Image (spheres, rainbow, N blue to C red):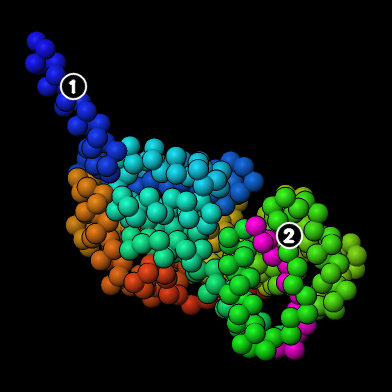
Amino acid sequence: MKKVFAMLLAAVMVAALFAGCGAGSADANTIKIGMTGPLTGDAAIYGTAVKNGIEIAVAEINEKAKAEGGLKIEFKAEDDEADGEKAVSGYNVLKDWGMQVFIGTVTSGACNAVAPGAVADQMFLLTPSASSAEVAMAGASTFQMCFTDPNQGASAAEVISLNWADATIGVIYDSSDDYSSGLYEGFKAKAGELGLNVVCETSFTKDTKSDLSTQVTQCKDAGADLVFLPIYYTEASQILTYANKIGYAPTFFGCDGMDGILGVEGFNTALAEGLALMTPFDANATNEATQSFVAKYMENNNGQVPNQFAADAYDCVYAVYKACVAAGIDGKTPAVDACAALVKQFGSMTFDGLTGSGMTWDANGMISKAPAAVVIENGIYVPMG
């Protein structure tokens, strides 16, 4: 009896060991995809958008599999509150669940905390929105659906040089945030190359962002007639509100973190009129794929219009799905083997999605797709010529 008990105990221990190694699904036709993101807390609007976008893509794929057969997806999300330690904890929970592919995290700081472990585990990581250059450089198995911060910052400088070449420019950024600082550094380098007239550079931190009046006043006093805001829209709404209060009306220009400013609770959206921003997704686009996605998103989320974070997440699922089908990955494929196959597929495939067509990835996992800028006119995004 002791011998039988010892054998059973050993079997249980082995099973527990493999449960934490991306062993996959009990169903060969179902792959397991996990995500961590801020589902609560100050950044919850980003995490919930990503989760909602993923769920729409998963539902579509599973409906197709139900009707036609083929690969299905089981999805599980963990809340990381945009915190690195909580993101690592959530990632480990998902590994124990049997995750084969990781779509996450949502924010750069959390992803920088998780990425080294994912690389060590040989877990394929595709983030919809963690745009820090460090994410892609963490290892061969980390990929991004979004632009890296320095590249997007440089693109913003190019757009400004084409449309406001003679502007006097102020910059307000968050020096405590990886995303904002990365955008700022990319913008600063390219602005110098292009000879842009930057007359004021001022910053804040997570501990001082409740009052940004000083930064706005500095730009006004410096005579900036265009203010570059490489920040998230929650802080941007404060800046636009205070600028209006003191009668300061420059052109404001933001990046993809600005996407969603029209939905800030309590914000007078009329103040965003004329604001320009970089975004790969326009919810007002007339193509069938975008219209279908927007309609489903609004139906599932009480009429809320999806932002770029939701669209990038939706694209992540379909890119992974396309690669899995091409590589023959299924629910029985160990995460390590799935990772090797997906790295190979992403290194060679071209992908068309909501946020771009002809998208490709380089050897570092950084995406190549055309940057786009829009201007808010009459409460909607209008493509910038």
Numbered circle sitting on residue 200: none
Amino acid marked by disc 2: Phe
Magenta extent: 165-176
Report the residue marked by disc 1.
9
* Residue 3 seen from this side: yes
Nearest to N terminus: mark 2 or mark 1: 1
In the rendered image, residue 319, in percent from the top left (x then y), is placed at 35, 62
Q: Quadrant of the N terminus?
A: top left
Q: CA distance from mark 2 to mark 1?
A: 56 Å
The residue depicted at 72 percent of the width and 50 percent of the height is: 207
Q: Secondary structure at mark 2?
A: strand
The residue depicted at 47 percent of the width and 63 percent of the height is: 134
Report the residue marked by disc 2.
204
Residue 262 lies in the magenta stretch? no
The residue depicted at 86 percent of the width and 67 percent of the height is: 217
Q: Nearer the viewer, residue 299 or 305?
A: 305
**Mark 1, other Cα within 10 Å: few <14 / some 14–19 / many ≥20:** few
